[in-house]
Amino acid sequence: RNHIAKVVGIGALKYAELSKNRTTDYIFDWDTMLSFEGNTAPYLQYAYTRIMSIFRRAGLNSADLTGPFNLTEPAEIALATRLLQYPEAVESVVEDYQANVLCNYLFDLSQHFMTFYESCPVLKADDEMRDSRLRLCDLSAKTLKHGLGLLGIQTVEHM
């Protein structure tokens, strides 16, 4: 429990600093930084944790997933499209030295994931659709973890 609080707290502070354009001022506000809503590290960490929870409930890990993606719902397509834009976001950060671009990408990705999660049942879908959606969840988790890692922010499996 203390470990989770430490990871979330430190992540919140780092993200608050990195998510703002470095040439603008902002107001230091713990309540905003630690919020589980909006463009904050706790929101992104929670999205990651939610995905890990799906895999725990499924009793699977990513190595168990095979087969093609089967994207039919608008939320699936939107999430997959956003995932494909990750290399561009990272490249933009490297070129422009603007970490806030990656923060904005990760926040947008998390929002796309939450929309997908709410509109596309993962574990209750038929086997083929379930596997496709689990693969989409896995790719989302890996992208969030990698992106947060680039920002020096850890993820946790439980919250």
Image: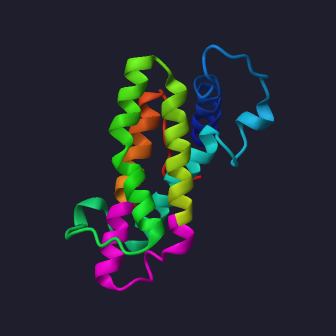
Which stretch did the figure color magenta? 116-136
Q: Main secondary structure of the magenta part?
A: helix
Question: Who's the residue at 52% across and 56% down the image?
Answer: 112
Question: Who's the residue at 71% across and 38% down the image?
Answer: 34
Against 126, residue 6 (above or below) is: above
Left or right of residue 26: residue 117: left
Percent x, y for residue 159? 59, 52
Q: Coloured how?
A: rainbow
> How many labels sit on residues?
0
Question: Who's the residue at 38% across and 50% down the image?
Answer: 83
Q: Nearer the viewer, residue 1 or 152?
A: 152
* Image quadrant where one finds the N terminus: top right
Percent x, y for residue 114? 56, 60
Residue 2 falls inside the magenta stretch: no
Q: Nearer the viewer, residue 64 or 27?
A: 27
Left or right of residue 9: residue 74: left
Answer whether residue 1 is visible to the viewer in this image.
Answer: no
Against 135, residue 44 (above or below) is: above
Against 141, residue 128 (above or below) is: below
Q: Residue furthest top?
A: 23
Against 3, residue 68 (above or below) is: below
The image quarter in which residue 126 lies: bottom left
Question: Who's the residue at 65% across and 33% down the image?
Answer: 9
Residue 132 falls inside the magenta stretch: yes
Answer whether residue 12 is visible to the viewer in this image.
Answer: yes
Q: Residue furthest bottom?
A: 126
The image quarter in which residue 67 lies: bottom left
The image quarter in which residue 96 lies: top left
Percent x, y for residue 13? 65, 27
